[in-house]
Image (tube, grey):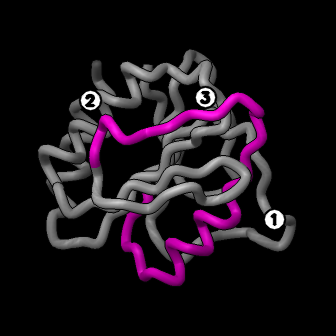
Amino acid sequence: MRWHKTILSMIQQRQDKRIALAVDTSTNEAPVILINNIVKLFEQLKPDTLLVQADFKIRNISPIQSDSIKYHTHGKSSYTLVLEWAKEEKIDTLFYITDVTGFFAEDMEKVDFELFWLVPGDFLPRVPFGKAIKVA
């Protein structure tokens, strides 16, 4: 559980920052227990974190709460709207729980905030920007 200590430290270092946690809800085959544990960590350490539930569109934005995530079965996800939302809302750090198999707008080459992809599973894909962290 090295990732647990890494995320714990990252949250603690950003107590004075505006943070959001996005969850890719495009499939109901997601590792729900793992995702809930990550959300609970944010909920306990930084309760003012915003929780963004998104697949091919933003489904919900609310104060962080681990029992409020609703998953879908279509498997389609796009990261563009969440990344644009984070920029508009002046989010300092965005954590995004996803397998990174979704769509990015072609003209999006970088973001102007910290971005950490929290990737459940054994495979850690390359990300176009930000930093990928395996959480499995």
**Whole-percent x and y of residue 47?**
17, 56
First in sequence, mark 3 or 1: give its number.
Answer: 1
Magenta stretch encompasses residue 87: yes
For the residue labelled by badge 2, is the local secondary structure a helix, a strand or a loop?
helix
Name the mark on residue 94: none
20 is higher (above) or lower (below) than 91: above
User: At x 44% / y 19%, what residue is drawn?
Assistant: 136
Give the mark, 2 or 3, whose residue is nearer the N terminus.
2
Q: Amino acid at mark 1?
A: Ala
116, 80: nearer the viewer: 80
Q: Position of residue 75 (x, y in %)?
A: 75, 33
Q: Which residue is mark 3?
A: 124
Secondary structure category for the residue under label 3: loop
Q: What span is colored magenta in the figure?
A: 65-94
Q: Which residue is mark 1?
A: 105
Q: Measured from the top left, where is residue 129 in percent x and y? A: 63, 58
* Quadrant (top left/top right/bottom left/bottom right) for the N terminus: top left
Instruction: Rate crowding at label 3 as few (under 14), some (14 to 19) or many (20 or more) other CA atoms within 10 Å.
Output: some
Give the residue at mark 2: 4
Mark 1 and mark 2 lie on one chain; the one further toward the N terminus is 2
Q: Residue at x 37, y 41 (%)?
A: 68
Which amino acid does the dot numbered 2 rest on? His
Left or right for 28, reference 126 = left
